[in-house]
Image (cartoon, rainbow, N blue to C red):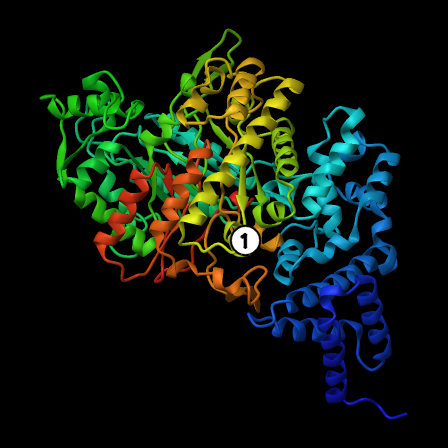
């Protein structure tokens, strides 16, 4: 019998792939698997692994803007190969893999990869039933880059790196974990709802929840925010907490605005303080040395007030030139900015820098503890000008525009600092009765009350040392995101929002956080951050151009709907489980939250009365995170960003994966204007509308060319501030495309 040559074999393989691609939109995947299996069985002179490798590579190479659907053919081939590998490890056939759910849970629990809580909480009958709910056809919703990302980053692996978990099993394990403590009479139906939303890619949970739910290690929350007090013990204790949380996969935002500046006095000795930079160096070392579960180095953002005497050296810490002893390349930076500073920048006025320690000693108050309650007037500017006028208080006077120039120089070189508009944030804080917000988190979407932890020690009678901690508000971010394109086009928004709010609320009670003050804060406010991704994807499907008043208006109406359903869902949970402990006295309870945002009409007035009467489950509700990783899994565009390119290559260690804009077609191409071609003022205008409805913040990037004029970038920042944006994230310049982002906030 004549053997088939390699060229003939390749032609035959390409023929069957072309056949599959031509039928793809109507192809039944049972038929797909049968065709592939039949073809594989006919290739006696080529190993199965090599055959699949060749077929996958051939399909991947054909992915392009002209033929984007090849991504689904490549994904289906990859999935078939994944099934085969897992079947071998389970000693089962490829066809009945999803019939072994209970045995998989039992085996992974025995291997100490799953938490024993799963089998302790659910009976065999319940697990078997949930196994019957698994729908393998939903595995074919993934694009190629989506299934590769899910497999490499999220599916459970053995200690040797062998994939042990199927995609639908991961979604079910997440659902079972997050619904574990629900009332047993309705728990199974709630799990089915959660599984429906996750497996159909209507929503995603943040990376820590996605990766760690059901497992024997890791926590579920995305990131944390700490306030460092101006004393040695607080600084070192904060660093210990940072290392503990970083080890478990959390990103962090650290507020250093209370720490005295360089040249300040210590215990009356003049000019001896080294300022904030040495403590940043310490945090930088922690970020590098204490990595996140062995996967990547720790991710930390440090914030400082723009009136702090160390602001210039702070703004230079990430630059690639200058004194390396003053550089912290592995930290991200953010600036806390009052309205008054922006006014002085715009008017080319003077700005005064102070030492926070000296202000506290001389003035008897801390300047950072105030904000302007109204636009153009308020407590902060009153206190600030008091400090300027006080004869005993040292100050440095600089033109405000000079500080802003340094901000923009750093942004064009490194993408940072992030901008945190503190007056806007605190004016719109839903819980002003319980505190102050000094800064945001690593990805600028979280805005919750903060305060420093105070510690005291004493020796008791039996010779032991007792430590007393007065816990401050250590902010915890619990994140998930709705796929706008899929959810809106399928008209499932209300249902998906309700599921998302419940799952996030459950994360709060399931988490066993290693930093106890974070655990306390989490319980007091029960803060969550329900966000979105796929905004540009949705606009393309709706036939709306990014740079249009129609897109701006649609953004306003859509996010009002999201806000309404989110608040309503949290209110229903409060009736079922009780309001968050700090509800009384909040803007939610007084109705001020609704008044500040100008909500009117019968449904809003009714919801306002219902919330005031029966409460709200969560003190903070909405936040739009970057979520680039999980939006890739869901086959959509990231967050609220415009797409980067119509077609690009996702870099892996030793290969590249071609990726196209989602649902790219001759019809949608016209609506996919890429990020660096979009007029950023339109993006600001959209975000102004969106921010009105989001009670926390938004990870909002500015995309600029590297040759942008200083005045144009300044105008963008002034536009963002005047439009009521709470934060801006990276300034993404065409000269700098490699931005390290916090995996934790990818929701």
Q: Position of residue 709 (x, y in %)?
A: 23, 57
Residue 40's quadrant in the figure? Answer: bottom right
Image quadrant in which the C terminus is located: top right
Q: Secondary structure at mark 1?
A: helix
Residue lying furthest front in this view? Answer: 602
Disc 1: CA contacts within 10 A as few (<14), some (14-19) or many (>=20): some
Residue at figure coordinates x 72%, y 26% from the top left: 181
Residue at figure coordinates x 75%, y 61% from the top left: 82
Q: Position of residue 502 (x, y in %)?
A: 64, 30
Residue 109's quadrant in the figure? Answer: top right
Q: Is residue 337 above or below residue 604?
A: below
Q: Nearer the viewer, residue 329 or 416?
A: 416
**Residue 116 seen from this side:** no
**Residue 671 seen from this side:** yes
Q: How many numbered marks does the figure carry?
A: 1
Residue at figure coordinates x 63%, y 23% from the top left: 572
- 694 lies left or right of 682: right
């Amino acid at each position: 019998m004549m053997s088939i040559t390699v060229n003939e074999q390749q032609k035959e393989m390409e023929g069957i792939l072309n056949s599959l691609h031509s039928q793809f939109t109507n192809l039944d995947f049972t038929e797909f698997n049968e065709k592939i299996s039949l073809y594989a069985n006919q290739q006696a002179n080529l190993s199965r692994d090599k055959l699949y490798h060749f077929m996958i590579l051939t399909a991947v190479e054909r992915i392009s803007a002209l033929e984007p659907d090849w991504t689904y053919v490549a994904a289906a081939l990859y999935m078939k190969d994944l099934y085969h590998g897992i079947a071998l490890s389970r000693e089962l056939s490829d066809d009945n893999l999803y019939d072994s759910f209970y045995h998989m849970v039992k085996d992974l629990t025995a291997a100490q990869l799953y938490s024993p809580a799963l089998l302790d909480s659910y009976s065999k009958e319940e697990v078997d039933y949930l196994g019957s709910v698994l729908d393998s056809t939903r595995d074919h919703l993934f694009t190629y880059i989506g299934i590769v990302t899910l497999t490499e980053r999220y599916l459970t692996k053995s200690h040797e790196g062998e994939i042990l978990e199927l995609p639908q099993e991961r979604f079910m394990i997440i659902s079972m974990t997050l619904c574990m403590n629900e009332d047993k009479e309705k728990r199974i139906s709630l799990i089915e709802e959660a599984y429906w939303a996750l497996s159909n890619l209507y929503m995603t949970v943040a990376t820590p929840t996605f990766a760690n739910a059901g497992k024997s290690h890791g926590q579920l929350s995305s990131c944390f925010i700490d306030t460092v007090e101006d004393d040695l013990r607080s600084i070192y204790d904060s660093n210990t907490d940072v290392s503990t949380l970083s080890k478990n996969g959390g990103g962090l935002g650290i507020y250093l605005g209370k720490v005295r500046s360089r040249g300040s006095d210590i215990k009356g000795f003049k000019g001896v303080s080294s300022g904030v930079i040495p403590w940043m160096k310490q945090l930088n070392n922690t970020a590098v040395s204490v990595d996140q579960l062995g996967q990547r180095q720790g991710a930390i953002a440090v914030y400082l007030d723009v009136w702090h005497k160390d602001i210039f050296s702070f703004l230079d810490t990430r630059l690639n030139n200058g004194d390396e002893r003053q550089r912290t390349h592995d930290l991200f930076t953010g600036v806390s900015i009052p309205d008054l500073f922006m006014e002085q920048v715009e008017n080319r006025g003077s700005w005064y820098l102070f030492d926070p320690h000296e202000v506290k000693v001389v003035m008897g108050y801390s300047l950072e503890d105030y904000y302007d309650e109204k636009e153009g007037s308020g407590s902060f500017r009153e206190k600030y000008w008091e400090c300027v006028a006080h004869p005993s208080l040292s100050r440095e006077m600089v033109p405000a525009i000079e500080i802003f120039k340094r901000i923009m120089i750093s942004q064009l070189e490194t993408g940072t600092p992030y901008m945190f508009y503190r007056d806007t944030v605190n004016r719109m804080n839903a819980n002003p009765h319980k505190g102050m917000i000094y800064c945001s988190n690593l990805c600028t979407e979280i805005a919750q009350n903060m305060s420093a932890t105070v510690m005291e020690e004493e020796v008791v009678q039996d010779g032991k040392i007792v430590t007393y901690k007065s816990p401050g508000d250590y902010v915890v971010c619990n994140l998930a995101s709705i796929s706008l394109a899929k959810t809106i086009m399928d008209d499932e928004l209300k249902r998906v929002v309700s599921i998302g709010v419940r799952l996030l609320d459950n994360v709060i009670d399931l988490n066993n956080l290693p930093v106890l003050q974070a655990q306390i804060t989490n319980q007091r406010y029960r803060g969550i951050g329900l966000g979105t991704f796929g905004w540009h994807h949705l606009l393309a499907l709706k036939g709306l151009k990014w740079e249009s008043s129609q897109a701006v208006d649609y953004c306003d109406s859509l996010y009002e709907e999201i806000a309404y359903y989110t608040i309503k869902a949290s209110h229903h949970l409060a009736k079922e489980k009780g309001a968050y402990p700090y509800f009384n006295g909040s803007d939610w309870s007084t109705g001020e939250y609704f008044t500040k945002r100008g909500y009117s009409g019968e449904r809003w007035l009714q919801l306002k009365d219902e919330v005031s009467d029966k409460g709200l489950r969560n003190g903070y509700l909405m936040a739009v995170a970057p979520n680039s990783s999980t939006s890739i899994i869901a086959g959509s565009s990231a967050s609220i960003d415009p797409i980067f390119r119509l077609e690009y290559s996702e870099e892996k260690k030793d290969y590249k994966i071609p990726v196209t804009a989602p649902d790219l077609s001759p019809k949608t191409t016209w609506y996919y204007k890429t990020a660096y071609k979009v007029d950023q003022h339109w993006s600001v205008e959209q975000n102004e509308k969106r921010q009105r409805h989001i009670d926390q913040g938004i990870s909002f990037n500015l995309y600029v060319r590297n040759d942008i004029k200083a005045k144009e970038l300044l105008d963008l920042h002034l536009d963002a501030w005047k439009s009521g944006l709470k934060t801006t994230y990276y300034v993404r310049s065409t000269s700098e495309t490699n931005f390290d982002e916090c995996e934790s906030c990818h929701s």
